[in-house]
Image (spheres, rainbow, N blue to C red):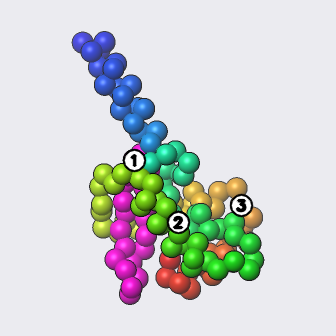
Amino acid sequence: MWRALILPTLVLAFAALFLRSYTVPPAPDRRGGTVVSLNWPNRPLFGSPRGACLDLAEGQPVIACLIASVAQARQDGIPLLQLGFCATCYGLSQRLATLGRDEAATQARLAEIGRFGW
């Protein structure tokens, strides 16, 4: 019996490598939400537009990076599931994005990003 489950388990494990999500918070100009999609594994499992924009140079506009990050995630992936805004997913994606980065610089960038409602 367990031998019959090996192949489906391997297929699901391989597919899980390509499973990604991103969470966008609600704002007056948009509905927030979490999207689970199949995508290349070049982004974190719990992604966020904020995570892609933390390492910008000082003079670069943050809002353009945020919009481009979401557009790239939508364009590159195959959406599987769209959920409402998930505060837990959003907090997890932010914690994962800030791992291993300078705390002061990260908080300053997050404050700048927060002014745009992201």
The numbered disc on residue 69 is 2
For marks 3 and 1, give the CA distance.
27 Å
| Mark 2 element type | helix
Does the magenta run of residues contain 24? yes
- 73 or 113, which is in the foreground? 73
| Percent position of residue 20, x then y | 44, 50
Is 88 situated above or below 36?
A: below
Neighbours of disc 2 within 10 Å: few (<14), some (14-19), many (20+): many
| Percent position of residue 56, x then y | 69, 70
Residue name at image x 41 percent, y 53 percent: 77
Q: Determine whether label 2 and label 3 are within 8 Å by CB.
A: no
| Percent position of residue 31, x then y | 34, 77
Is 110 situated above or below 79?
A: below
The residue at which mark 1 appears reads as 38
Q: Earlier in the sequence, mark 2 or mark 3?
A: 2
The residue type indicated by label 1 comes to Leu
- 14 or 3, which is in the foreground? 14
Q: Residue furthest left?
A: 1
The residue type indicated by label 2 comes to Ser
Q: Which residues are magenta?
A: 19-38
| Mark 3 element type | loop
The residue at which mark 3 appears reads as 101
Is 115 situated above or below 74?
A: below
Residue name at image x 70 percent, y 56 percent: 100
Locate residue 103: give its quadrant: bottom right
